[in-house]
Amino acid sequence: MAAADFDLIIIGTGSGNSILGPEFDDWRVAIVERDVFGGTCLNKGCIPTKMYVYVADVVEHIRHAPVLGVDAEIRSTRWRDARDRVFGRIDPIAVGGEDYRTNRCPNVTVFRGSARFEGPHTVRVDGAALGNSAVITARRIVIAAGARPMIPDIPGLDEVGYYTSDDIMRVDRVPDRLGIIGGGFIACEMAHVFHAFGSSITLINRGPELVRNEDHEIRARFLELARQQYDVRCETSVLQARRSDTGISLLLSDGATVEVDALLVAAGRVPNTDQLGLAGVGYALHDDGRLVVDQHQATGVDGVYALGDICSPFQLKHVANHEARVVAHNLVHPDRPQASDHRVVPHAVFGSPQIASVGFTEEAARAAGFDVMVKVQRYGDTAYGWAMEDSTSICKVVADRST
């Protein structure tokens, strides 16, 4: 099969799809996508999660209302209505994005299928819509193919069936008992959502705490409050999963058995480099599978850049968008490249309670050699904290005394 040559190949339509501005109108561009247009954030991550979390927060506010002098009650929560509202907004955006690139961008060719590198600048795309496969080449390539849920090797897991963040938000009904394997931001956000809609939550995490990348005092407070809402099993692993008469039976490393009706695996994410075959054609990878890039988002292969979860330690949409802007500039102006700035990356965990953070944790600041000064303030001691009757929240500031 003869290879079709392009000026630019973009693999992935999350933040990679935002690269193309007017400066690329005279470039012949190939876009490769195997899944839904818009990437993880739009379809399976940030946006639907936040829409569900808002509903869960409303439920919590109503439960808290009597303390404020408001008598209110929750008669019911309508999961299907909430779900259909979420994806009724999101799905047309994904469809519209694909239609725009396919039918209204004359310089762009969309290839629907899975990409795999056959050489540093040669990509085979396999997909039924292509009549099995197509081979495309370009001197300049952007790899923005993202990451996927990591599935732990647990005997019986495939047999009992499980959800991941890819599909849990589209279920038809809320399980009475939801088991969640993992303790990171996805696990904690989904625990908040499904608990608000009526699920009894069991969180099973092999580490000693939840949200392990947060500051130690934030981790401790979050774990304390999570245990007031869910059955939290830390320093515990699932040794086996099997079907039982009453649902799914999970044998834990401490000898206990937990019964659930549905299981969410939220044990982390892995970059999709292995599925692209990058290691075999000259690309360097980190030990965790991420593609190695420099400060300009350039790989070690001339003319090839990467962005987002496939290369970044920050699995955050706003980071990927920043990197996409850098890549767009560097493609057009390789003689005066820009560098990505990852020095201060804000992030949030939309669980219960919510966490917002930017900059160094206390541990990281001390390890970096700063003369650390710390202030922890109970939010309930502030005026707005009084207004909310907030008895649990804290704000922590970590500063360098020398400045």
Image: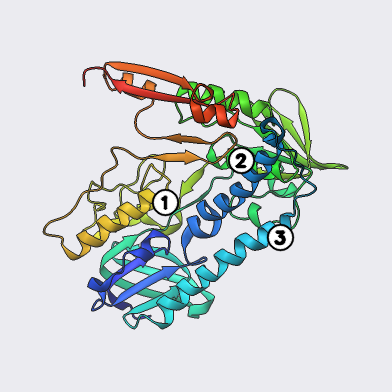
Instruction: From the image, tell me which residue sits under label 1.
Output: 317
3D distance between C-alphas at marks 2 and 1: 28 Å
**Contact (Cβ within 8 Å) of mark 2 with mark 3:** no
**Residue 117 or 379: which is nearer the viewer?**
379
Task: Let me know if residue 154 appears in the view.
Answer: no
Q: Residue furthest front?
A: 69
Looking at the image, which residue is at 61% across and 40% down?
A: 153
Q: Position of residue 355 (x, y in %)?
A: 50, 34
Instruction: From the image, tell me which residue sits under label 3.
Output: 81
What's under tag 2, amino acid-wise?
Asp
Task: Tell me which label, 1 or 3, sits earlier in the chain.
Answer: 3
Indicate whether 385 appears above or below 172.
above
Q: Position of residue 188 (x, y in %)?
A: 59, 38
Looking at the image, which residue is at 34% across and 32% down?
A: 359
3D distance between C-alphas at marks 1 and 3: 27 Å
Looking at the image, which residue is at 26% across and 19% down?
A: 370
What's under tag 3, amino acid-wise?
Asp
Closer to us: mark 2 or mark 3? 3
Task: Look at the image and tell me in which quarter the C terminus lies.
Answer: top left
Indicate whether 48 appears above or below 116.
above
Task: Tell me which label, 2 or 1, sits earlier in the chain.
Answer: 2
What label sits on residue 266 in the rendered view?
A: none
Q: Is residue 94 left or right of residue 306?
A: right
Looking at the image, which residue is at 31% across and 47% down?
A: 292
Q: Secondary structure at mark 2?
A: loop
What's under tag 1, amino acid-wise?
Lys
Indicate whether 380 appears above or below 49.
above
Q: Give neighbour class at mark 2: few <14, some 14-19, many 20+ (Cα, 10 Å).
A: few
